[in-house]
Amino acid sequence: MTLGDPRGIGPEITAQALALPLDADIIVIGAEEHLTAIPAQQRIVVGSFPGGNRPGGEREWAIRAGKIAGHAVETAVRMALAHEVDAIVTAPAEKHALHLAGFPYPGHTEWLAHLAGDVDVAMMLAAGAFRVVLVTTHVPFRDVPALLTTDRIIRTGRVTIKALKEWWGIAAPRLAICALNPHAGEQGLFGDEEGRVLRPAALALEAAGPFPADTVFVRAIRGEFDVVLAPYHDVGMTAIKVAAFGKGVNITLGLPFPRTSPDHGTAFDIAGTGKADPSSMREALEMAVRLAGK
């Protein structure tokens, strides 16, 4: 488990998530000051981050935090690739701080894919049997139409199908594809991506759709599909968080090891106040243990 940005709620929700019994040996990686309060079989220090004054100003403090969070993730991945651990759980990190510290990735998903050998990955959000996979992740919305190619959807779908079979034991996964445009384009009136890009991908994957965003997630929640492929970040994230905020888990599919994380960010505004809810971190931890068992 990596503690994420030491300025955020990662250390405290990790400590709370580990307070209950768990059938797993835990290694925690983070700043020295936070490790002593966390129950674990092993602790790995990747830096120091004392509280109080912030020498050098906010920028230098952010760089220091980013280095700690970044080195923790890289250490965890090295251990996973060396089969020293069976799964990784990552607490939230701030992307801006990571960038300042020299880790120039849009998010954990893309970063882990690179560290694992530039493998094809997919970002899944799961809350029980409701699962959403993002076809495009941390990119500006204006770039989505160009990035949303038939090939990209097919590659994402294949990574998803493999994971559902091997990690969830679903013999014949039922996929649905969420449309990009309102009303699934209304037969080209509001855009042609559904017919030109999404439908060929659906046929290749034997998936249903594309269906409008305002109905496909409801159908998935009711059990009609095992997963929905969402065309861009916010449409998929909004669906999962409205349905199950605090219970969702972020899972990186396609890696040679399971990686999970909670469904929220660093929450700097409540760090250290005792208000942080560890439920999603606990769900992420339990999911990692289940997937590692597969």
Image (spheres, rainbow, N blue to C red):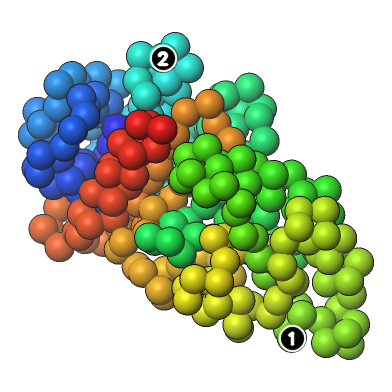
In the image, which disc is placed on residue 83? 2
Query: Can residue 52 be seen here?
Result: no
Image coordinates of residue 48 in percent, x first then y, are 23, 25
* Image-based side of 206 in relation to 22, left or right: right
For the C terminus, the image quarter is top left
Q: Quadrant of residue 163?
A: top right
Image coordinates of residue 117 in percent, x first then y, are 63, 22
Front residue of 146/198: it is: 198
Between disc 1 and disc 2, whose residue precedes? 2
Is residue 197 shown above or below 160?
below
Query: Can residue 135 be seen here?
Result: yes
Q: Residue at x 35, y 20 (%)?
A: 85
Q: Quadrant of residue 268?
A: bottom left
Q: Which residue is mark 1?
A: 183
Q: Quadrant of residue 285?
A: top left
The amino acid sitting under disc 2 is: His
